[in-house]
Image (spheres, rainbow, N blue to C red):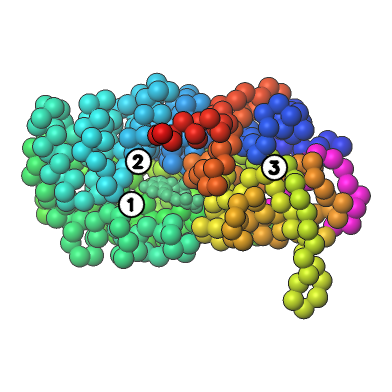
Amino acid sequence: WSANVSKIDGVLTIAGEPATDLAQEFGTPLYVVDEDDFRARARGFREAFPDADVYYAGKAFLCVATARWIAEEGLNLDVCTGGELAVALRAGFPPARIGHHGNNKSVAELRRALEVGVGRIVIDSFEEIDRLAALSAELDVRAPVMVRVTAGVEAHTHEYISTSHEDQKFGFSISDGAALEAVRRVLAADGLEFLGLHSHIGSQIFVTDGFEVAARRVLRLHEQIARELGVTAPELDLGGGFGIAYTTQDDPRPAEDLGREIVKIVTDECAALKIDVPQLSIEPGRAIAGPSTFTLYEVGTTKAVGLDGGGSRMYVSVDGGMSDNIRPALYGADYSCTLASRESEARPVLARVVGKHCESGDIVVKSEFLPSDIAAGDLLAVPGTGAYCRSLASNYNHVPRAAVVAVRDGEARLILRRETEDDLLALDVE
Ligand code: LLP
């Protein structure tokens, strides 16, 4: 749960706002963001990495409001598509503080990034070097670039969110020489300004050993570039990936500890290589947005289902599901939940919270003990849904995407409105 959440007489309350009032005013399912918590985590990263540039990874959750919070808290912003860039620009985010990622940016996306003057473009393929060189000549601008490299480490996380082993689509491999060759071509290209190397090893990571191996390999390449190509890159980005707690099983390290440890790894390695420490940057997304938010659902039907081997499980259906949180279906992610609308003295029973979609994998919370008297009209709240839930939301089964409300000092403000059936029907061409 985020910092300002507590239960008062059984009703979940966030920054002074009862969940029951929020559900009544804004409907369910509803993403409820604790704005102070989001901002505090953003500031926390700046304080934990005082000499580094912190880029919030917008893919975790980006809308005009969150882009403004990030700007106001003094962070930079990482976008990876033209759509994310459009949101940032609508929010008035200073382009010079935006980094543009993407393994397959279109020419139009690259052109726009150069036209608006983003601070850096992270190059992910040889074609992109040629495209950027051509565009910078056409537009008569210099393109500030980083080169994304693959350090060849296993990040100890789900395969779909690991990005630094060799057999995946991102970056230039260090081990087969592609990374060095990419830097050579960047340096030889007119119009490209080489800022440094970028490495992101994966997401929802709890241990620093992967970072450590990656940082060492990337710094060795950084030193090799200086020695063989005669250019000392001013910057180095170590990506994001800091894990958060989804259930009591997860035990993430505080940002300050990670900051101290990662900066020490880099400083020691630079000392060993006898090179100056480059300007560091990091890109946390989940660790800023994730814990700030819970999703509020209304319970509909309930059903007791017998289990092989005895006993039973109560299936509690809510009014959302895999369309507002695909993470259980996609990554086998675990969540927890609590009854948010009232006190209950009823005995706890084994329950599974499921959505309203037409798939048996449409699970919100795989396993949780809930009061046996849970019934239609009750509200359930699922914490830790601020990252990669709204941003991965879909309209599966023509379910309109849920609204997002920000709560601060007892006031609730809609920051993304709920989609309507009319929004969906407006796409049909008759
Ligand atoms: N930088 C780069 C280049 C990235 O690709 C990512 C995440 C980040 C930073 C931020 O990582 P974070 O600090 O949020 O872990 N949908 C998946 C996560 C996908 C992560 C994609 N890239 C999930 O829900 O777990």
Q: Which residues are magenta?
A: 336-348
Can you say whether 225 is above or below 78 in the image?
A: below
Q: CA distance from mark 2 to mark 3?
A: 30 Å
Q: Amino acid at mark 3?
A: Tyr
Q: Residue lying farthest bottom?
A: 309
Residue on which disc 3 sits:
297
Task: Give the SS element for disc 3.
Answer: strand
In front: 122, or 387? 387
The answer to which quarter of the image holds residue 414 is: top right
Q: Is residue 119 left or right of residue 209?
A: left
Which of discs 2 and 1 lies nearer the camera? The answer is 2
Which of the two discs, 2 and 3, labels the residue nearer the N terminus?
2
| Residue at 84% from the left image edge and 40% from the top image edge | 342
Q: Residues within 10 Å of mark 1 (few under 14, many from 20)?
A: many
Residue 182 appears in the figure: yes
Residue on which disc 1 sits:
199
Q: Mark 3 and mark 1 in contact? Answer it, CB < 8 Å.
A: no
Q: Residues within 10 Å of mark 2 (few under 14, many from 20)?
A: many
